[in-house]
């Protein structure tokens, strides 16, 4: 359970989210997801990253959540997705 990475071959890295029942990421899950994507980006053998979920769905939303350090975390996510695009 959590965030895992694996190789699908041909330069494709799979990042899998596994937080049953609906894969709603906890706070640490977001940090782990960002770390996994960054690690794939640093890997010279990776040319594509596929984000996938175990189970029936994947919920990538913040829904107005606040917690200590939220502003920093939110900016890191924005920077990460801007970099990926």
Image (spheres, rainbow, N blue to C red):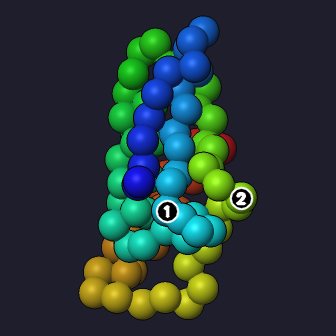
Q: Residue at x 34, y 88 (%)?
A: 67
Q: Report the side of 11 relative to 71 (left or right).
A: right
Q: Report the side of 7 relative to 29 (left or right).
A: right
Which x, y percent locates residue 76? 41, 62
Any part of residue 34 in sight: no
Q: Residue at x 50, y 21 (%)?
A: 7
Residue 19 numbered tag: 1
- For the N terminus, the image quarter is bottom left
How many callouts does the rendering have?
2
Which x, y percent locates residue 34? 42, 52
Question: Which residue is denoted by mark 2 in the rendering?
Answer: 56
Say above or below: 64 vs 52: below
Which x, y percent locates residue 71? 39, 80
Quadrant for residue 40, please give it: top left
Q: Report the side of 72 relative to 23 (left or right).
A: left
Say which label, 2 or 1, has the lower sequence index.
1
Disc 1 element:
loop
Q: Residue at x 40, y 62 (%)?
A: 29
Residue 38 numbered tag: none
Name the one closer to the observer, 24 or 60: 24
- For the C terminus, the image quarter is top right
| Disc 2 from disc 1: Cα separation | 11 Å
Name the one closer to the observer, 39 or 76: 39
Any part of residue 81 in sight: yes
């Amino acid at each position: 359970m959590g965030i895992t990475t694996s190789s699908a071959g041909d330069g494709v890295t799979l990042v899998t989210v596994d937080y049953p029942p609906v894969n709603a990421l906890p706070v640490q899950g977001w940090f782990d997801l960002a770390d996994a994507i960054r690690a794939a980006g640093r890997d010279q053998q990776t040319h594509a990253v596929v984000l996938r979920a175990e189970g029936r769905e994947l919920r990538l939303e913040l829904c107005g959540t606040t917690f200590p350090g939220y502003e920093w975390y939110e900016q890191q996510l924005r920077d990460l997705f801007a970099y990926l695009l």
